[in-house]
């Protein structure tokens, strides 16, 4: 969860504060979590935190001695929208998930029911809905346990011209991502690749056109290759074929 302390931020004008340290933390989380964000720096960020949100129809507790009991019926989660006015990213942090539905949906103490909680985002105008894993399936509890960037409870996406998920995937069918997507025709530049989750002992090999190159595993969801000097590589993504693991 991202937060700022009152003794650290600077109030520039009414309704706006600046905390460079917080923006740096958000920037590094995005750079490390999603390929193609190496040159990104968050100039602005909106952070919204829902702390101890109860489900619809939860009993109202006012006694202090029942505070621990009340926490069992609440969820705590956060959304961070960051941009440099060109690229935009969203970070969703799930700290505690204890309920998955509401009484109006037929749930019993926040569980079960006819309609499970939905988690995701849209284009801001009600269109382009993108659901997070486990959304609407009654398994939304797993959002706090799993991640697409290797940090339990954290989910990162690029959300401007196209929706790009951060991290990696162990699904048998998926897609590969390269950054940059274009380079000089003479090659010799570093290319980051992302797709399947890479284990510590994996040997990563990538084919650009008909040329196979050995790559270096940087972390679980990223490897780095050197574009071969041969061939026409003006559009890298069009020539990326597979990532082989041994």
Image (cartoon, helix red, strand yellow):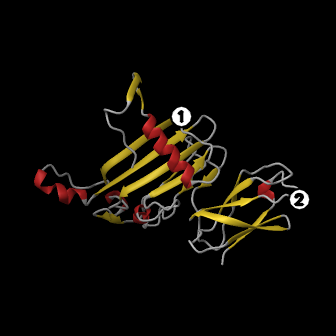
Count the numbered circles shown.
2
The numbered dot on residue 31 is none
Left or right relative to 193: residue 136 = left
The numbered dot on residue 231 is 2
Q: Position of residue 225 (x, y in %)?
A: 71, 61
Mark 1, secondary structure of its residue: loop
Q: Which residue is mark 1?
A: 43
Left or right relative to 218: residue 59 = left
- Gap between marks 2 and 1, in whole Å? 38 Å
Q: Is residue 195 above or below residue 179?
A: below
Q: Is residue 26 above or below residue 220?
A: above
Residue for point 86% across, 52% down: 186
Left or right relative to 18: residue 109 = left
Q: Position of residue 170 (x, y in %)?
A: 59, 71
Check the image and name the residue furthest to the right. Answer: 231
Nearest to the observer: residue 62 or residue 85: 85
Nearest to the observer: residue 18 or residue 171: 18
Residue for point 19% across, 60% down: 69
Residue 109 seen anywhere in this rendered image of the structure: yes
Residue 118 seen anywhere in this rendered image of the structure: no
Mark 2, secondary structure of its residue: loop
């Amino acid at each position: 969860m991202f937060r700022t302390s009152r003794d650290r931020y600077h109030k520039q004008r009414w309704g706006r504060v600046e905390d460079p340290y917080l923006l740096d933390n958000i920037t590094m989380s995005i750079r490390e979590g999603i390929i193609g964000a190496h040159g990104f720096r968050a100039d602005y960020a909106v952070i919204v935190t829902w702390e101890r949100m109860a489900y619809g129809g939860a009993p109202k507790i006012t006694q202090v001695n029942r505070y621990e009991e009340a926490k069992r019926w609440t969820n705590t989660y956060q959304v961070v929208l960051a941009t440099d006015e060109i690229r935009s990213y969203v970070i969703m942090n799930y700290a505690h998930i204890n309920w998955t539905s509401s009484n109006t949906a037929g749930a019993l103490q926040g569980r079960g029911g006819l309609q499970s909680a939905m988690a995701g985002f849209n284009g801001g105008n009600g269109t382009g809905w993108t659901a997070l894993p486990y959304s609407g399936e009654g398994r939304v509890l797993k959002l706090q346990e799993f991640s697409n960037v290797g940090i339990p409870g954290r989910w990162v996406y690029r959300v401007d011209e196209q929706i790009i998920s951060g991290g990696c995937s162990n699904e048998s069918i998926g897609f590969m991502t390269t950054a940059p997507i274009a380079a000089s025709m003479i090659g010799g530049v570093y290319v980051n690749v992302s797709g399947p989750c890479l284990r510590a002992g994996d040997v990563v090999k990538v084919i650009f056109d008909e040329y196979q190159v050995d790559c270096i595993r940087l972390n679980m969801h990223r490897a780095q290759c050197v574009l071969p000097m041969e061939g026409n590589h003006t559009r890298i993504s069009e020539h990326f074929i597979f990532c082989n693991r041994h």
